[in-house]
Image (tube, rainbow, N blue to C red):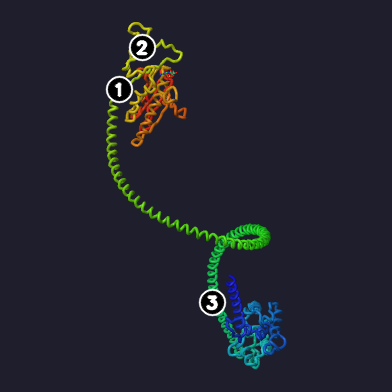
Amino acid sequence: MGTMHGEYEDFDAANRRAEVIDWLGGLLPEFDLPLDSSDEELRDYLIDGTALCYIADKLMPGVLEGMWGGYASDQRSNVKKFLCVVAEMELPGFSVKDLEEGSMSSIVECILAIKDNVTTRLSGHISNYAAKTPIRRKLELQETDGPVLSVAIPGKLSPGEERRKGHWDPKSQQRSALLSGQKVNEVFQYKHGSYTDLPAAKISEMLHSNSLDHAPTQSLLRVVNGILDESIERKRGEIPHRVIYLLRNVIQEIEHRICIQADHIRNQNSIIKTREDKYRSKIKALETLVNGTNEENEMAINRLEVVKVEKYKIDEKRKLGEQDMIRLMQEKENAENIINSLHQEMQVMSRMHEQFREQMETKARQMEEHLTLRAKEAEFCLMQSKKKVEEVEAASQQKSQLWSKKANIFQSFMNNHKVSIKDIKISSQSIKQEMHVLQMTWRNEMSNIGHDLKGLVDAADNYHKVLAENQKLFNEVQELKGNIRVYCRVRPFLPGQDGKLTAIDYIGENGEILISNPSKQGKDVYRMFKFNKVFSTHASQAEVFSDIQPLIRSVLDGFNVCIFAYGQTGSGKTYTMSGPGTSREDWGVNYRALNDLFDISLSRKNAFSYEVGVQMVEIYNEQVRDLLSNDVAQKRLGIWNTSQPNGLAVPDASLHPVKSTSNILDLMEIGQSNRAVGSTALNERSSRSHRYTQ
Ligand SMILES: Nc1ncnc2c1ncn2[C@@H]1O[C@H](COP(=O)(O)OP(=O)(O)OP(=O)(O)O)[C@@H](O)[C@H]1O
């Protein structure tokens, strides 16, 4: 924008300078500068002040005093005179220094102000101009007290041409023009009715002198009007020929002046058109410039937006940078604190190091003293050791003599030993031979043992077959004896009971028992019962178990076995199943059965592997409880059905399904009052539990 503004200013200055040059070209005929002349070219033309003085003289003839123009003493006096005229006209001036080396703008503005002033004045002159008297070669407009505007006529030397020819004196020329004008006025100022009476000599003087050239157009028109008025007043219309001739010349002069004025106006029009075209082209250029400026403005706005965005980013970055700076300052403070603490630690360490160094130096001195003492001691010891060495050498000589003796003895011993070694070698060879014989016999024996082992393996196989056959036969015997066996054991009287009140009358060998009831009559007194076997009151625990033991062993062969005791309270169920004490003889059926099973499983451990499980339950008031469970709530196992014949109860199958697995031994004692039941179960290869009925 600054550049554009500068360009516009240059353009405006050039325009104004061109306007000055154009005006001067019309005012000063010798002025031949082109319109696009530079400031310096205009300065060169105006710097001597001659042209300026000529302008002032044109504006106010005679106003310049003394010698001016080419006759001036120096250039500065010309310029100063011009500036005095300008000051009198109250127009803006300039300094001489500006004209010599400063800016030309003030000079241009001054001349343009003069031009405007003259144009304003001429607007009134030109209206009168057409009605003035024609002059043949030069037209001069002059008011009574106004400025004079001269126009150069072709064919006559202009003041510039005269000046260039070295004889042009604008002041004398002007002065002669003024004098001839006054003379013409005197010549042409006649009263009415006097033109026809002009003598021929006077008319000839008017025609043959420069009177017409210098006469104002107004005077010439006054002459024409006067002649015409006189011709009208004279009814006869007779006007002398000489007056008519004068009239014709005056009219020709006026026509000539009008033609010149018309030419001048046409020239001015063409100049104005040329300027108009120039101004239009300049306006187009300015419009283009303005359009370009608008585009540049849009681009500048876009750039401004971009710059705003960049500024916003830069502000954000600046804020981040400030935050970073604050953080870095804090880190710096922390680092400084750390450095200070480290510095303090370093000082402490250096002090400690100094103390340590001093201590070490003290120690070193002490050590040095100590080492000196030790060195002296070592020297002393060395002396003593030398003495001892000498003593030892003496002793060693004695010992060497002894050793030589011992060596002789050892040599003789070695000789004897070699002899004995030879004997040992001979005996070892004989031992080797014996060992070889023994190895051969051992191999033979091992082969025999292998054969024997093979026979044993075959025998073992046969043994297993035989054992299986025996087991089969045993179980068949058990089945023949009956799968359900009922034994009766008679409890002896307890201490304090009367033995005469016994109901047992007879016990048979084949399981018969005769019960007598004295309270009954007839054959109802005796009743005979038949069991598999009846144990008398003298039967021991071992005798009772001996009849049950085969059934228990059949468990190991895959049969389920259940043994339970039944009887009224105090009849001896616990005594029979558990025993009265813990001694081996007192063991009841439970202990003996388990012990027997453990013995058998132990004896068969190389061939079979048995797992034994134990379950303890209590049946009391028709409630079954697991006595080995830690959870009291879980002890209850189910409801028992006691509606079986003979008072037997079976578990509800839906609640407690009886597992059909074999290899189970149940040992129970069942009281009449159903108060308590103890049960022990043994399972071969299985620890699954099994519950039986009451
Ligand atoms: N064969 C026997 N020899 C000696 N004493 C016996 C014999 N049988 C039982 N007794 C004794 O009889 C008493 C009652 O026996 P036991 O407690 O075994 O009866 P029980 O049927 O288990 O009674 P309950 O049903 O009330 O438990 C005990 O003192 C016991 O020592």
Q: Can you tell which of label 1 and label 3 is closer to the viewer?
A: 1
Q: What type is the residue that disc 3 sits on?
A: Asp
Q: Does the residue labelled 2 lie within 8 Å of ligand 1?
A: no
Q: Mark 3 points at which residue?
A: 277
Q: Nearer the viewer, residue 95 or 623?
A: 623
The quadrant holding residue 555 is: top left
In this view of the protein, can residue 159 be seen by the observer?
yes
Residue 527 to residue 36: above or below: above
Q: Are marks 2 and 3 in contact (CB under 8 Å)?
A: no
Q: In which quarter of the image is the N terminus?
A: bottom right
Q: Which of 396 and 15 is in front in this view?
A: 396
Q: Name the residue under label 1.
A: 482
Assign a secondary structure to mark 3. Answer: helix
Q: Do the residues labelled 1 and 3 touch (CB within 8 Å)?
A: no
Q: How far apart are marks 1 and 3 (CA)?
A: 155 Å
The quadrant holding residue 652 is: top left
